Image: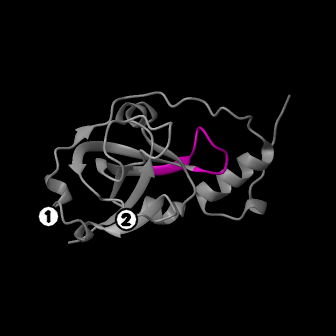
Amino acid sequence: MAQDVVQVLTFKSVETILSTGGTQSWALDRERARNCEFAVMCRNASTREAQGPEEHRSAFMVGRVNDVVPSTETPGRWLITFSEYALVDWQDEWEGNRNPVAYYRTDNYDEIDDFESLEFHPMPVSVAPAPSFPMTIARAKRELAESHGVPEENVEIVIRG
């Protein structure tokens, strides 16, 4: 049975993805991404910041989606966390979309018949870095509302000093 996949075009290395617990700084539909079973990382080698040796547009990693949480790098963006990962080498996987996030089904991939047959490894235990931007009441309310599926006006925050 085909499963949902979120595919991203990233310049970040396997090591960076493993140390972060997933792939981040994405503008995406959180609920749609959370409902995906897998995330496929494709190499963006067209930027000077490219961290990995893989060929441009090739898929190099598959993560089993664990959750989608606020990015620790970019306010208003998302981090797709993984419970497991597999390294792959699938050439010319990225189809050239302008948006670096795309959604597919596992049966859209010709390179493999069954994603479950990949050699998955547990994600290393890592401590997520604190966001590099200050927490604000507005941002906290927005993120809490999004994560609990309620309107922002239903979130109250009290700070006692």
Mark 2 secondary-structure assignment? loop
Q: Residue at x 29, y 58 (%)?
A: 92
Q: Residue 57's spot in the image, x, y percent?
A: 35, 53
Can you tell which mark lies on residue 60?
none
Left or right, residue 119 beside residue 26? left
Position of the N terminus by quadrant: bottom left
**How many neighbours does mark 1 have within 10 angstroms: few (below 14), some (14-19), or many (20 or more)?**
few
Q: Is residue 69 magenta?
A: yes
Q: In the rendered structure, which disc, 1 or 2, sits on the residue that comes first in sequence?
A: 2
Q: Which residue is mark 2?
A: 95
Position of the C terminus by quadrant: top right
Q: Is residue 57 magenta?
A: no
Name the image quarter holding residue 18: top left
Mark 1 secondary-structure assignment? loop
Q: Residue at x 47, y 66 (%)?
A: 32
**How many neighbours does mark 2 have within 10 angstroms: few (below 14), some (14-19), or many (20 or more)?**
few
Q: Is residue 67 above or below residue 93?
A: above
**Three-letter amino acid code at the position of disc 1:** Asp
Q: Residue 64's spot in the image, x, y percent?
A: 32, 50
How is the rendered protein coloured?
one colour
Q: Residue at x 55, y 50 (%)?
A: 78
Q: Residue 14 or 48: which is nearer the viewer?
A: 48
Q: Residue 30's spot in the image, x, y percent?
A: 53, 60
Q: Give the magenta part as a residue range.
A: 67-77
Q: Residue 17 or 128: which is nearer the viewer?
A: 17
Distance of label 1 from label 2 (alpha carbons): 19 Å
Q: Which residue is mark 1?
A: 113
Left or right, residue 65 beside residue 115? right
Q: Nearer the viewer, mark 1 or mark 2?
A: 2
Q: Residue at x 17, y 60 (%)?
A: 111
Q: Residue 88's spot in the image, x, y percent?
A: 22, 46
What secondary structure characterizes most of the magenta part? loop
